[in-house]
C-alpha cells in the first residue's frame, strides 16, 4: 500500500479559539507542515456533527482530524467535553461496524501550540500514508 | 407491592386481563387505558381506550407488536395537559419509553405502567395470516416454544430482558404461572383493593422459569452478535449487509428512539447538483444510487445506538428484509459498553451524550 504517488487527503475541523489559532500560529511562525490537510474552521469542537466526519470518509477522504481546546480550556466551557464523548461514540461505532476508525483523530491543540499543530499534521499524514488510501474512495458499491 | 391473582374463568386469559383493565379504568385516578386491542378484522393495534366496553377487546397477550407503543405513549405524555393513563407495555416498549422520557419526548407524569412479561411476538404478516395462539408452550417452565411452523421475530428470539424492569408500577407475571388457575400480578398497595383481584403469591416456579428463558435468549443473542460481528468485519462489511437498502427510511420511521419530527435525511441537503453525482461517478467508476444510504445508517447509529433497546421494529419494517436490528443491536451493545450504559433502566441515569465528566478518557486528544 506504499503507492509513491499517494498523497493523503485529510479534512480537518478546527475550533476557532484554540486549534485554528494554533494553525495560524504555525503559519505565522513559518513552520513547515505537509499540505495534505484541508482546514475547515468551526466555532467549537463541540459543534462537529458526526455527519461532518462520516460524509468525507464515505466519499473518500483519507482521514478526518478534529482539533479542539484542551479540556478545561473550552471557550464555551464544555463544548470539548461533549466533543470527546461524541468522538468516543463515533469511533466505537466505526470500529464496531467494521470501518477503519483509525482514520479519525481528535487532538487538543491550544492557540499557543503552533508547533504541536504542525507536528500533529505531519504525524497524521504519515500515519494515513502508511494506512494507504481510503478503500471507500474507489468502492462504488458503498454509498 | 402486593402479590395478587387475576382469576381466569372459562372465557380464558384474554377475558381475565380485559376484566382487570376494566377494573383499573373504574379507579378515580385513571382516565384512560393504553393497551393492545383486537379489532373486528382480527388485527391487533395499540389503542387509547376511554370506553370500558371497548376494553373487553383488550388483548395485551396478542403475540404481535405492530409498533413500539413507547412512541405512541410519547405523543400522549410529551406535554400538558395530560390524561392519567394506565399503559400496558411490553418490556422493550417500557425501556424505549424510559429513553424517550430522558430525551424529553415523553413523561411518566400521570402514567401508571402495567408491565407485562413478554413471551415473544410474531411478524405481523404471520400473525395476520393465522392469528397464532397467544400463549405459547412452556410459560410455566420458561422453555418457551413458538407455535408449530412459526418463528418469533428475530429481536424477540434474542431478547434477554423479557420481564418488566424498573418503571413498571404493576407487573403481570406470566412466567412460571399456571395461567389456567389465574394470572399472577404484582400491584402497589393502592391497587390491592381492586374488586377483581384475589389474594395471590408469586408462582413457585417463576424464578426458575425466568432464569431459563433469559439464559436461552442470552445464548441466542450472543450467537447472533458473533455472527453479525463476523459479517461486519469481513470483506464488504456493513456496505454489503446494507447493499440492498432502498433508502425508504422505514427503519427510522418505526424506531422509538429516533424521535426527530423531520429527520435530516428527509430534507434537501442530500439533493446534490447533477454535476456532483457525475463527478463522483467519474472518480469511482460508478455511483450507487440512491446515494448516502450508508451515511444514513451510520448517522442513525450515531444518534440512537447508545439508546437502542433492541425492539427490532426496524427489522420488521425493512422491505428488503435486511437485518437492520441485528446490526444496530450488535453495534449498540459495543457503544453501550463503552459508556457503561444500559438503556431503559433508570430515568435518573443521564444519557451518555448529554452529559460528561471532566475527568474521563483523559488520554484522548493528548497523544
Image: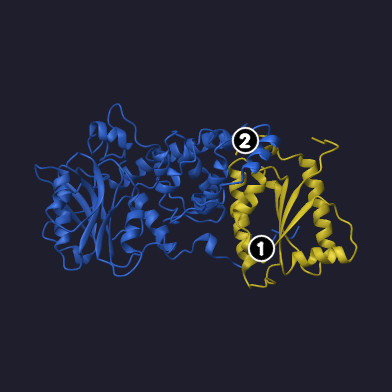
Chain colours: A yellow, B blue
Where does label 2 land, which residue?
B287
Depth order, front residue of A88/B250: B250
Q: Is residue B89 above or below residue A16?
A: above
Q: In this orientation, which residue lies closer to the viewer: B30 or B366?
A: B30
Q: Is residue B234 shown left or right of residue B149?
A: right
Q: Can residue B181 be seen in this view?
A: yes
| Numbered label attached to residue A45 | 1
Q: Is residue B272 left or right of residue B199?
A: right
Q: Which residue is drawn at 66% across and 63% down?
A: A45
Q: Where is residue B9 in the image (x, y as percent from the top left)?
A: 9, 45
Residue at figure coordinates x 34%, y 47% from the top left: B67
Report x, y in % for residue B119: 30, 42
Q: Which residue is found at the position 51% from the left and 43% from the top?
A: B330
What secondary structure is found at the residue carrying circle 2? loop
Q: Mark 1 lies on which chain?
A: A
Depicted A57 relative to depicted A18: above or below: above
Image-based side of A127 in relation to B272, left or right? right
Classify 10 Å Cα crowding around label 1: few (below 14), some (14-19), many (20 and above).
many
Q: Indicate which label's residue lies in the foreground, 1 or 2.
A: 2
Amino acid at each position: 500500500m506504499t503507492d509513491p504517488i499517494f498523497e493523503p487527503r485529510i479534512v480537518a475541523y478546527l475550533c476557532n479559539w484554540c486549534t485554528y489559532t494554533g494553525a495560524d500560529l504555525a503559519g505565522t511562525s513559518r513552520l513547515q507542515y505537509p499540505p495534505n490537510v484541508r482546514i475547515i474552521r468551526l466555532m467549537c469542537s463541540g459543534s462537529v456533527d458526526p455527519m461532518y466526519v462520516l460524509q468525507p470518509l464515505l466519499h473518500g477522504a483519507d482521514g478526518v482530524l478534529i482539533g479542539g481546546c484542551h479540556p478545561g480550556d473550552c471557550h464555551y466551557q464544555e463544548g470539548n467535553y461533549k466533543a470527546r464523548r461524541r468522538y468516543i461514540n463515533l469511533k466505537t461505532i466505526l470500529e464496531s461496524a467494521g470501518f477503519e476508525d483509525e482514520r479519525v483523530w481528535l487532538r487538543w491543540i491550544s492557540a499557543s501550540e503552533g508547533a504541536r499543530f504542525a507536528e500533529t499534521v505531519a504525524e497524521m499524514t504519515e500515519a494515513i500514508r502508511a494506512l494507504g488510501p481510503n478503500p471507500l474512495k474507489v468502492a462504488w458499491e458503498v454509498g | 407491592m402486593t402479590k395478587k391473582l387475576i382469576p381466569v374463568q372459562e372465557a380464558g386469559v384474554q377475558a381475565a386481563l380485559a376484566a382487570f383493565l376494566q377494573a383499573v379504568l373504574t379507579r378515580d385516578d385513571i382516565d384512560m387505558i393504553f393497551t393492545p386491542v383486537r379489532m373486528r378484522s382480527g388485527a391487533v393495534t395499540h389503542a387509547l381506550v376511554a370506553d370500558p366496553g371497548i376494553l373487553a377487546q383488550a388483548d395485551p397477550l396478542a403475540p404481535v407488536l405492530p409498533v413500539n407503543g413507547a412512541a405512541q405513549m410519547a405523543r400522549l405524555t410529551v406535554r400538558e395537559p395530560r390524561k392519567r393513563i394506565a399503559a400496558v407495555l411490553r418490556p422493550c416498549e417500557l425501556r424505549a419509553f424510559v429513553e424517550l422520557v430522558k430525551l424529553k419526548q415523553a413523561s411518566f407524569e400521570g402514567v401508571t405502567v402495567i408491565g407485562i412479561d413478554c413471551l415473544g411476538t410474531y411478524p405481523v404478516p404471520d400473525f395476520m395470516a393465522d392469528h397464532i395462539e397467544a400463549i405459547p408452550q412452556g410459560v410455566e417452565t420458561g422453555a418457551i416454544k413458538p407455535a408449530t411452523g412459526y418463528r418469533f421475530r428475530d429481536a424477540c428470539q434474542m431478547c434477554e430482558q423479557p420481564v418488566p424492569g424498573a418503571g413498571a408500577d404493576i407487573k403481570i407475571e406470566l412466567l412460571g404461572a399456571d395461567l389456567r388457575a389465574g394470572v399472577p400480578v404484582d400491584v402497589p398497595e393502592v391497587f390491592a383493593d381492586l374488586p377483581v383481584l384475589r389474594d395471590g403469591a408469586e408462582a413457585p416456579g417463576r424464578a426458575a422459569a425466568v432464569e431459563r428463558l433469559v439464559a436461552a435468549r442470552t445464548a441466542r443473542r450472543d450467537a447472533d452478535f458473533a455472527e453479525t460481528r463476523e459479517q461486519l468485519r469481513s470483506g464488504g462489511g456493513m456496505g454489503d449487509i446494507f447493499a440492498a437498502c432502498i433508502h425508504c427510511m422505514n427503519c427510522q420511521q418505526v424506531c422509538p428512539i429516533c424521535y426527530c419530527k423531520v429527520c435530516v435525511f428527509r430534507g434537501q441537503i442530500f439533493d446534490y447538483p447533477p454535476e456532483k453525482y457525475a463527478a463522483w461517478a467519474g472518480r469511482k467508476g460508478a455511483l450507487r444510487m440512491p446515494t448516502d444510504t450508508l451515511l444514513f445508517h451510520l448517522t442513525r447509529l450515531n444518534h440512537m445506538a447508545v439508546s437502542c433497546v433492541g425492539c427490532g421494529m426496524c427489522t420488521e419494517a425493512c422491505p428488503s428484509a435486511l437485518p437492520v436490528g441485528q446490526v444496530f443491536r450488535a453495534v449498540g451493545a459495543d457503544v453501550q459498553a463503552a459508556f457503561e450504559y444500559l438503556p431503559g433502566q433508570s430515568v435518573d441515569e443521564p444519557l451518555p451524550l448529554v452529559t460528561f465528566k471532566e475527568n474521563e478518557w483523559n488520554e484522548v486528544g493528548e497523544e
